[in-house]
Image (cartoon, coloured by chain):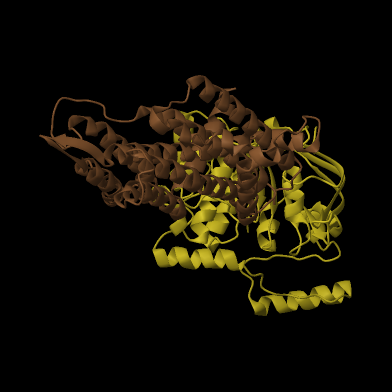
Chain colours: A brown, B yellow
Amino acid sequence: MFYRIRSFRAIVRTTFIEAIQEPAALLVLLTAVCVTSVAPLFHFHAFGEEGRLARDGGLASLLVFGLALGCAAAGAAVHRECASGTAAAALSKPVGRGVFLTAKYVGILLVCGLFWISVTAATLAAEAAADRTVVVGDSWDRLPDVRLRQWAIFAPLAALAVAGLLQNRRRARFGVATFLLVPAALLLTVLASGFWSHAGVWGPYTLRLNLRLIPVALPLFFALALLAAWSAALAVRLPTGAVLLAGAAILGAGLAADTWSAGAPAASLRGVLAGLFPNIQHYWLADALARGGTVPWSYIGRAAALAAAGCALALSVGVGLFRTRDID
Amino acid sequence: MTPVIETTGLRKIFRDFWRRPTVCAVDSLNLTIQPGEVFGLLGPNGSGKSTTIKMLLGLLHPTAGTVSVLGRPPSDIFIKHRIGYLPENTHLHRFLTPRETLRYYGSLFGLDRRTCRERGEALLEMVDLADVADRPIDGFSKGMARRVGIAQALINAPDLLILDEPTSGLDPVACREVKDLVRALANGGVTVLMTSHLLADVEHVCDRVAIMHRGLVQTEGAVGDLLVRADTTRLLIANLSDAEAEPLRAELAARLNRDVIADHPTVSLESYFLDVVARASGKSSVLTHFRPAPFLQKTGIGGAAAGSARRGPA
């Protein structure tokens, strides 16, 4: 039993390191974080609510960039390993194909987790730093939290600098160090924002973050997990490009699921497809936050269960395809 | 005695995307390898050697026939605890260091952290990579990566060692050391199945060989039996000058009424090369590494020199 845990952990760890040390993965992470932090600087529309532009923009970045990262990383991790022969080397050891594929998937899930923490933290910071109506004496003004905004932009740069230092001094892998330091730096930034007011006045610690955003961001992680599971499953037979195309098709069908599956009887073809395809609309809840709305945790629990069932289905399909595959 | 490897009527046909057969890589392969044997699988490129090995490891599914490895089908992953495998092209994660690579493969065998570390260090010493153990493999030469591959194949102290082109990319000194290592491991009870394009390697190391061509075994047998010229006899006399040899040759030819040839035997190019390098280095021998790590010495192997006692490289 213990040997299985050790081998599983070893594959997870190697997959995780391999995925995050890819320059493309780091680029996607930094782009998503920068877009989330910088976009609120450009005021086009307030969408009728202070901070909504920053919040919706951050959640959209989380979904779009996250899906690109999850699908590409899962596809590359599985297909590249089969193509390069490292899968053959691993499977010549006492490692079952099901364990191997599941461990690869869990490694990618950890990457998606770090990405989720980073972009969610950036979104929390962007929303907290967005323009607010501030009363100054007898008048009022709309002011951003300039310090938090600056710190949120500075945090990834600081992470890059520290990663460079670690590479220079301790021969740490630059990509790996950066991918680990960016979420840590952003989390520290949003937590530190409690030490000053929106107007920038230092004072006793008060958490100013919109924590209602967390239960809205969590389902997006479930969507990433689901798409990554299907990508890993398909990658046992398809190259990365084809996996990305398939992922885009599943995403498109999932976004439109409410349209094409509405009213379909469970026993019909449409009904079966509706059960199999992940309905992305179940996971996009940004509008629920409008005007102080919340998402109940019971819904998050049900969404998590639905996503877990979808991931199990995808991985079962993947293991079935993998077992019959010849590994060169 | 139960064979370590036994195949009966083994066949592998590769198919294209539409399931149409493209090539029959292995056909009607009947192979039996006994414990402690060093078996060589020879053949030109595309003869089915690597395909055979991958079927033995359960990586490829046979089209027909049966395979038994250590008494079990290759789909049984528990037998793989006792197998070490070196692929033809050293497939390693290029971003890992040798130390991390050995820890990774040790973990796949379920070895605990301490055992992984101890065996890893011993193997790094054995393959002479201790000095570069923390450098990513990405910057390694083919020979250095091959050494890491050899080390990972031994991390579990295997009972059956499968080596696909083990000397590929190695310099002559390392080639010789690998051959010595294989013999030493075999003397300790490890069964070895190896392929090689370098026929001299196989000749010096293997007890038995099979020669494959287009997926079929053309011939199989003990190396000595296959190579001996039973209809010819050579007399070896030390310190005999040409002037002394000629009358003897003539006398023998006249007495036997047959052609008699007198010549000087040659040493192998490998031995000559190693001797030249040793002299240039000011040493008696340049063969200092690749002695089995202590944890590999299951039955008290004394090292490469002891291994050579049974059937030493020329």
Q: Quadrant of the N terminus of chain A?
A: top right
Outermost top residue: A298
> Residue drawn 70% across and 62% down?
B199
* Foreground residue among A231 and B217: A231
A250 lies left or right of A300: right
Nearer to me, B144 or A55: A55
User: x%, y% of residue B66?
Assistant: 85, 40
Look at the image and tell me whether residue A209 can be seen: yes
Return the x and y of residue B213 as percentages of the image width and height. 82, 62
Q: Position of A229 compared to B285: left or right?
A: right
Query: Residue A128: which quarter of the image?
Result: top left
Residue at the extreme left of the image, as rendered: A137
Kindly tell me whether residue B293 is visible in this rendering: no
Q: Residue at x 60, y 44 (%)?
A: B184
Q: Position of residue A287 (x, y in %)?
A: 47, 35
Of A200 and A312, the residue lying toward us? A200
Image-based side of A252 in relation to B33, left or right: left
Tell me if A136 is positioned left or right of B123 in this view: left
Q: What's the residue at 39%, 31% (across, down)? A: A291
Where's residue A105, x and y in %?
57, 38
